[in-house]
Image (cartoon, rainbow, N blue to C red):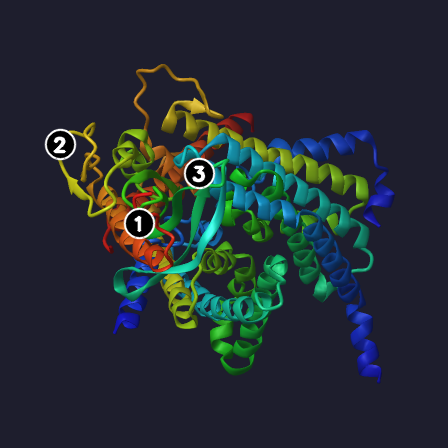
Amino acid sequence: MDTLNILLLGFISIVLINNLVFTKFLGICPYLGVSGRIDMAFGMGLAVTFVVTLSGTLTWIIDHWILMNIGLEVTRYVCFILVIAGAVQLVEMYLRKFFPSLYESFGIFLPLITTNCAILGLCLFINLWEIDNLLEAVVLSFGAGIGFTMAICIMAGIRENLNLADVPQCLKGAPITLITAGLLTLAFMGFAGMIR
Amino acid sequence: MSKIKHFFQQSWLLIVASFCFGLLIAVTNAAWSERIEQNEREKLFSLMRGLVGDANDFEIALEEAQIPAKKGRVIKTDIYRAIDKGGKGVGFAYVSIGSGFADKIKLVIAVDSKCEKFFGFKVLASNETPGFGSKIKEDYFSSQFKDAPAGKLELVKTGDDEKIDSEIVAISGATVSSEAVVEIINNSIIHIRSKLQEKGLVTNGR
Amino acid sequence: MADKSRGLSPAVYKETFLAGLWRKNPVFRLLLGMCPTLAVTAAVKPALTMGLCVIFVLLCSNIIVSLMRNLLKPHLRILMFTLTIATFVTIADLFLKAFVPDMSETLGPYVPLIIVNCIIICRAEACASKNGLVVSFIDAVGMGLGFTMTLCVLAGVRELLATGKIFEQAVMPAAFVPWAAMSMPVGAFITLGLLLGLVNIVTRKQT
């Protein structure tokens, strides 16, 4: 019962309170580049969720069961990024073979996910927070993906309306998106202290 | 055979480069790892030295003491014994963690050698709201813990923060953060004291 | 092939260097490398440290990639770039932990995140893998300096408004009430957005 409690609270905390985009500044590049279409944003979010859950789990396993046992922690970053690149390749090959229509709709997003700071960032944060059991790592990775999807869909929705608004010429594009993101961050700050 | 040859033809650079880079990292690590470890120890020790004034050095009194915390978690921490220049024990210091308003708060706490009075605490890591919860790092809050009795400390909203007793006046606008600090200290000292008494390390009246 | 026929003159070097500083400034014009820009610019000291680390990694990676450029197989090249960058970021991280531990603590996980910083991979792909050693070197220096400058400007604004100090030296008068919001994510996003808008106004006036 306690485990379930910890997992549930961990999940809620990483989706709402410690959201990777709004509090840890991860995944900003695709966040800015997302078009104002909610369906594309949702697709990107799902792709990221899948990859991040896989990577988070794999990197935790490699870190705890291999690297720490043979004292090679110094190669941690190299191993993590290679695992992530490999995971993205695997996902790409798998999708191309078994779900070609889904692969088509993801388009350019899938290879771009490798350089998404959110994935490597999450693996590093799991390391930093010293999460010591596998189930918690899986839940946190999944939660991070969900949080990213939520953030990106909210932003896509707002951008759809921003296109119709009267934005000053110099602020069109990236600047107004950043300012909107800042205001969203302010709103999400209200969730802090929800869990004690 | 030709498949293996083809494989090597394509990836020989990758293999050679991996080997070279691995060597580079290993050499750098070997050269600097001692310094890195020393920096980590110094960080903790310099904070502890700031708390226990007479201390000259620190030795581990109890390794991996387990403190039960909320929600069934267990915190593992090392208890350090502070020794002065004459080799006499002048107090104990340890690190404890608890959840604050925004994130976890990590404190280093020092008590005297009888585990009866606090020397104080310092914040190792915290992510509290800037301007409000971050004030737990300030002297006017932490000085209330100096010489406070190592029993059950109580958080009050208003009171005299100059008077040293078991009442701690909360920071206005940061009740949750203040309460978190008091709770971490209260929770940990009970278990630390009992673990040290088990080992017979607490000097009684001497 | 292209660089041998171009006849590399000092003018080309100067042009490459200056491009990295302003015309192709990685943060303001190319919109790359946003994640560290927002995360470490709460104060000027971490921003400067991060900028210097990026310069180091960019230099080393551009040099190595430029030396290897004729040996790279096309479908393995991204992997090679990533491996190179990861190695040098590990070295930079070890250096910080050994010699500047308090900065290493402040920057935290954002130092290894230099590995996925789009600036470095993009420069390796776009410039170092196609050009000679000297051009890659100058490009790295230009881009790195442009990035560091941007970080310091942003950090300067944020630190000044959040604490009234720059580089931990008090600048504002004692009566100044600090804007705590500047040191939080809100301040980061909004300040960067406004600065970008400002840059847009300036460049529009130039063209």
Furthest residue to the front? Answer: B206
Tell me the kind of residue under disc 1: Asn
Q: Are marks 1 and 2 on the same chain?
A: no
Q: Where does the image place residue B141, in percent across and percent down from the top left? A: 27, 33
Furthest residue to the bottom? Answer: B1
> Element under label 3?
helix
Q: Which label is found at residue A161?
A: 1
Which label lies toward us, 1 or 2?
2
> Element under label 2?
loop
Does residue C161 sit above or below A85 in this rendering?
A: above
Look at the numbered discs 1 and 2 and tell me whether their residues touch, using CB distance below 8 Å.
Answer: no
Q: Which label is found at residue B47?
A: 3
Measured Cα–Cα span from mark 1 to mark 3 = 52 Å
Tell me the kind of residue under disc 2: Gly
Q: Chain of mark 2?
A: B
Determine which quarter of the picture holds residue A90. bottom right
Q: Nearer the viewer, residue C21 or B161?
A: B161
Residue at (28% x, 47% y) in the render:
B185
Q: Chain of mark 1?
A: A
Q: Is residue B67 left or right of residue C133?
A: left
Q: Where does the image place residue B142, in percent across and percent down from the top left? A: 30, 35
Q: Where does the image place residue A29, in percent across and percent down from the top left? A: 49, 50
Q: Where does the image place residue B27, in percent across and percent down from the top left? A: 74, 53
Task: Name the residue carrying label 2.
Answer: B159
Crowd rating for badge 3 (residues with CA inside 10 Å; few <14, some 14–19, many 20+): some
Residue at (64% x, 48% y) in the render:
B34
Residue A155 appears anywhere in the view: yes
Which label lies toward us, 1 or 3?
3
Crowd rating for badge 2 (residues with CA inside 10 Å; few <14, some 14–19, many 20+): few
Crowd rating for badge 1 (residues with CA inside 10 Å; few <14, some 14–19, many 20+): few
Q: Which label is found at residue B73?
A: none
